[in-house]
Image (tube, rainbow, N blue to C red):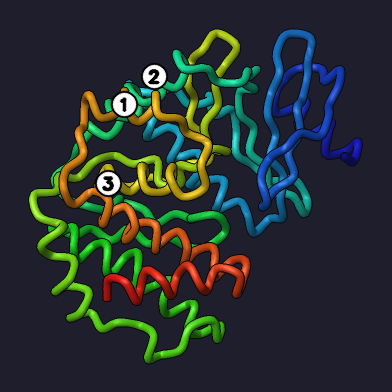
Amino acid sequence: MQKAFLDHIASVLNETIINYSSVSGGDISEAFKIETSNNSYFLKVNTLEAKGIFEVEKHGLETIKHSNTIATPKVIYVGNFEENAYLILEFIETKQPNDTDFNRLGEQLAKLHSTTANTFGLETNNFIGSLPQQNHFHDNWTDFYINERLLPQLHMAKAQGLLQAYEIPSTNVFETVLTPWFENIKPALLHGDLWSGNFLISKDGTPFLIDPAVYYGHNEVDIALSKLFGGFNTTFYSAYQKHLPFDAFTNARIEIYQLYYLLVHLNLFGRSYYTSVKHILTKYF
């Protein structure tokens, strides 16, 4: 890290930096642990174009925090210096989760999902990974999921030559299939990108959520991603279902919600995800 940038961060913190080190921070940004005499901070750095991503990450973390259901790292600052955009967060010292931790995570996620609203969506758009995620309001979950989630990713895949036009179902087909399974769904505040890399367990066992892509949607969307790439044990799901039980259509809905995330991966990482996407499209539509 350049000294001028490090001096700028020190001035923002109004503290003397005594050490910094590179840490794992995901696929999109560089990440560092910044240590001062009194505190430790998590610093994410990217190009200036990423400031918008950091701004909506800040908004998402604070939205979850204000629900008073599950912890998020405190947001210190979003800014830019020369060619860099950056986000400074409280640094969370972590440990490997045990069953007690997963039980607490499941209970607190269910409380987050019990935070509701009058409509599906969010007042701002945000990002899923580095891809734009639109959150226009809808009164109907079927309309939201088709128009704000599936169709944008399907059209992006077509534009990139990853799917052909004949492989994309029509809106009418989506509505016919999904409407019976999407009845009586109440808007729930979602993390939006809940894979195993986006939760932390602090040294004292407190669950923290990071890197959100928040909006009000169906609670099973977060569950679907948690099951797609593993990392959550049975204790987590048992604790969650004590508060928000699954029903006869949950397994089908989970696959349909996983389609969104597989399309995101198809658009971000290419053809290796085509078979998984095609399997769900063929199975249900």
**SS at mark 3 in the image:** strand
Return the residue nearer the eye: 127 or 110: 110
Q: Residue at x 52, y 17 (%)?
A: 98
**Mark 2, mark 3: which one is toward the viewer?**
2
Q: Are marks 2 and 3 in contact (CB under 8 Å)?
A: no
Callout 3, which amino acid? Answer: Tyr
Q: Are marks 2 and 1 in contact (CB under 8 Å)?
A: yes
- Residue at numbered disc 2: 103
**SS at mark 1 in the image:** helix
Residue 216: give its label: 3
Callout 2, which amino acid? Answer: Asn
Task: Decide if residue 283 is on the left or right side of residue 267.
Answer: left
Which one is earlier in the sequence, the residue at label 1 or at label 3?
Answer: 3
Between marks 2 and 3, how big is the CA–CA gap? 24 Å
**Mark 2, mark 1: which one is toward the viewer?**
1
Callout 1, which amino acid? Answer: Ser
Quarter of the image where the C terminus is located? bottom left
Residue 238: give its label: 1
